[in-house]
Image (spheres, rainbow, N blue to C red):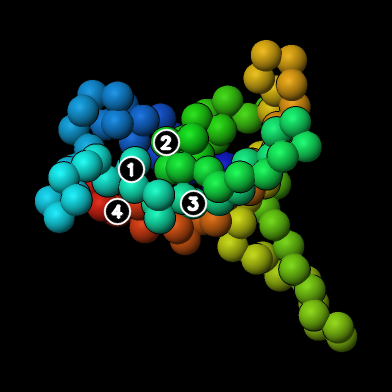
């Protein structure tokens, strides 16, 4: 259910982005989603890792083949969610893995509201 909700949000927000209705950053006079500090995760492709923009995160959510929520554990404690979602998919025959920091993704999504 949570994965489905993330996909639905990604589709709606990608429509905002593609429709040009995403807000402008008045200080830097650029689109908010293109600012470098707006990375919301990490994308691993072809054995290389790099920061992932909000728009890329939306794409990866929409096109992922598999998703799982990140887990963490402390010695002697029960495992718990770590605030990430890991997505797996393929583009042009090449596998990719995207790790989205959910809080950062939501923070960017809230800028539209």
Alpha carbon of mark 4 to alpha carbon of mark 1: how far?
A: 12 Å
- Circles 4 and 2, Cβ within 8 Å, touching? The answer is no
Residue at far left of view: 26
Alpha carbon of mark 3 to alpha carbon of mark 4: how far?
A: 13 Å
Label 3 secondary element: loop
Residue at 27 percent of width and 46 percent of height: 32
Location of mark 1 (residue): 33
- Circles 2 and 1, Cβ within 8 Å, touching? The answer is yes
Location of mark 4 (residue): 110
Location of mark 3 (residue): 40
Image-quadrant location for residue 27: bottom left
**Which one is closest to the eye, mark 4 or mark 2?**
2
Mark sitting earlier along the chain (3/4) = 3
- Numbered badge on residue 55: 2
Alpha carbon of mark 2 to alpha carbon of mark 3: how far?
A: 9 Å
- Please say whether residue 1 is visible from this viewpoint: no
Alpha carbon of mark 3 to alpha carbon of mark 1: how far?
A: 10 Å
In the image: residue 30, left or right of residue 45: left
Which percent across, then down, holds residue 98? 64, 41
Which percent across, then down, holds residue 69? 67, 53
Alpha carbon of mark 4 to alpha carbon of mark 2: how far?
A: 14 Å
Mark sitting earlier along the chain (2/1) = 1
In the image: residue 8, left or right of residue 21: right
Mark sitting earlier along the chain (2/3) = 3
Which percent across, then down, holds residue 47? 78, 37
Label 4 secondary element: helix
């Amino acid at each position: 259910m949570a994965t489905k909700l993330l996909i639905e949000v990604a589709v709606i927000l990608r429509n905002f982005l593609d429709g040009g209705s995403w807000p402008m950053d008045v200080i830097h006079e650029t689109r908010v989603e293109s600012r470098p500090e707006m990375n919301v995760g990490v994308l691993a492709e072809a054995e290389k890792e790099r920061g992932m923009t909000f728009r890329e995160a939306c794409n990866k959510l929409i096109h992922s083949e598999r998703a799982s929520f990140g887990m963490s554990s402390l010695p002697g404690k029960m495992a718990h969610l770590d605030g990430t979602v890991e997505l797996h998919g393929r583009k042009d025959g090449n596998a990719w893995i995207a790790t989205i920091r959910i809080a950062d993704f939501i923070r960017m999504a809230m800028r539209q509201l």
